[in-house]
Amino acid sequence: MRPAVSIVIPTYNRNKLLTRAIESVLSQGFDDFEVLVIDGAQSNSTRELVRSYGDGRLRYIPQRGKGIADARNLGVKKARGEYIAFLDDDDQWLPEKLGLQMELFKSLPSTYGLIYTAFNYYYLERNKILGTKKPKARGNVYRHLLKDNITGTSTIMVRRECFKRAGLFRMSFPTCEDWDMWLRISRICLFEAIDKPLVNYSIHTGQFSFAKYLAGRYRMIEAHGDIRHDPQVLSYHLLQIGILKLFSGDRTGGKDVLRAFKLNPTMTGNLQDVLGSIFDVRTKIYILKFLNRL
């Protein structure tokens, strides 16, 4: 019998964190699921960890380490459930997560293909919640996603059929491959959201590469004509990138800011949004980690 939900957990030599992630799944009130642990390291210790649970819902799948996008794609291809949820191995679900999403999906028409939730920024080293990110939009969220990744991948549950229509995660992205995926899915279906934080998104040492993040942002611009060819949207991206660069001490950010104002001299619809995003919890964390203060 097919499970209702397939849960994809990519991992790479992080068994301590993986244990925490798996146990947060096994603690769910909703239990009609399978867990696909995609192991990019093909590690015997990870294989044995998964087997040690003695739970037939857990499936160990070795993968030659080609990155997070390929791991998620392999999980999607192997999934048997009608719905697919994603959990990064360093994140943690709260016990109501699957149940609340499944209950909400049952109440929605088939035009809704994805549900995301609020989440906590959780500082692992200090066992402390730094802040919470709330959902910003529902329904047709395409225009919202053109500017910002309003979701969190470990919060998402999506109908499997959406991947058949929108395609899979693109491996050409150094980062932001998840943002690109949700943007493409938002073109074909509606999104719903849960305001309650149901995921702890982990912040920890060695997690963040500022250079790779910026490369991913530039790749988003390159990949999406609706970003490149809309002066307001493009100026938003460039202004945000430029300010982040300047905060981190990279003076080339001034060129991005200047180009942003040339595209949209009055910054109509942008300046307030960018300033809000610059000072939200996520961006503060990025800057602090870049400066080695977190």
Image (cartoon, helix red, strand yellow):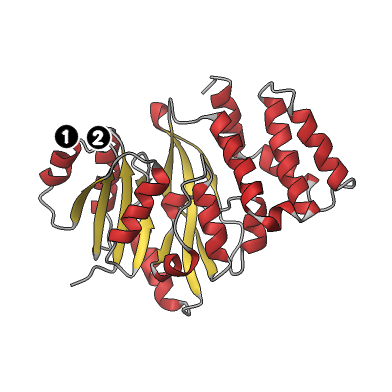
Count neighbours of disc 2 (C-alpha within 10 A) and say few if under 14, some if 14 to 19, many if 20 or more.
some
Which residue is at 30% across, 64% downward?
Answer: 5
Q: Is residue 96 visible?
A: no
Q: Is mark 1 on a helix, strand or loop?
A: helix
Work out whether residue 162 or residue 136 is closer to the camera in this orientation and state it: 162
Decide if residue 261 is on the left or right side of residue 184: right
Residues at marks 1 and 2 touching, judged by CB atoms closer than 8 Å: yes
Q: In this view, does 197 lie to the left or right of 245?
A: left
User: Of the residues shown, which amino acid type is indicated by label 2?
Assistant: Asn
Percent position of residue 37, x then y: 26, 48
Q: Is residue 99 left or right of residue 26?
A: right
Task: Please identify the quarter of the rendering in which residue 187 is found.
Answer: bottom right
Amino acid at the residue labelled 1: Ser
Residue holding disc 2: 15
Residue 71 image offset from top left, x and y in percent: 35, 47
Left or right: 101 with respect to 181?
Answer: left
Residue 129: image location, x then y, percent: 46, 37
Q: Which of 140 and 118 is in front in this view?
A: 140
Q: Which residue lies under the disc numbered 1?
A: 45
In percent of width and height, residue 52 lies at 11, 43
- 16 shown above or below 113: above
Q: Residue at x 33, y 70 (%)?
A: 82
Please state, as top left, top right, bottom left or bottom right, where the N terminus lies in the image.
Answer: bottom left
| Residue 115 visible within the image | yes
Please say if 294 is above or below 71.
above
Q: Which badge, 1 or 2, comes first in the chain's sequence?
A: 2
Above or below 34: residue 91:
above
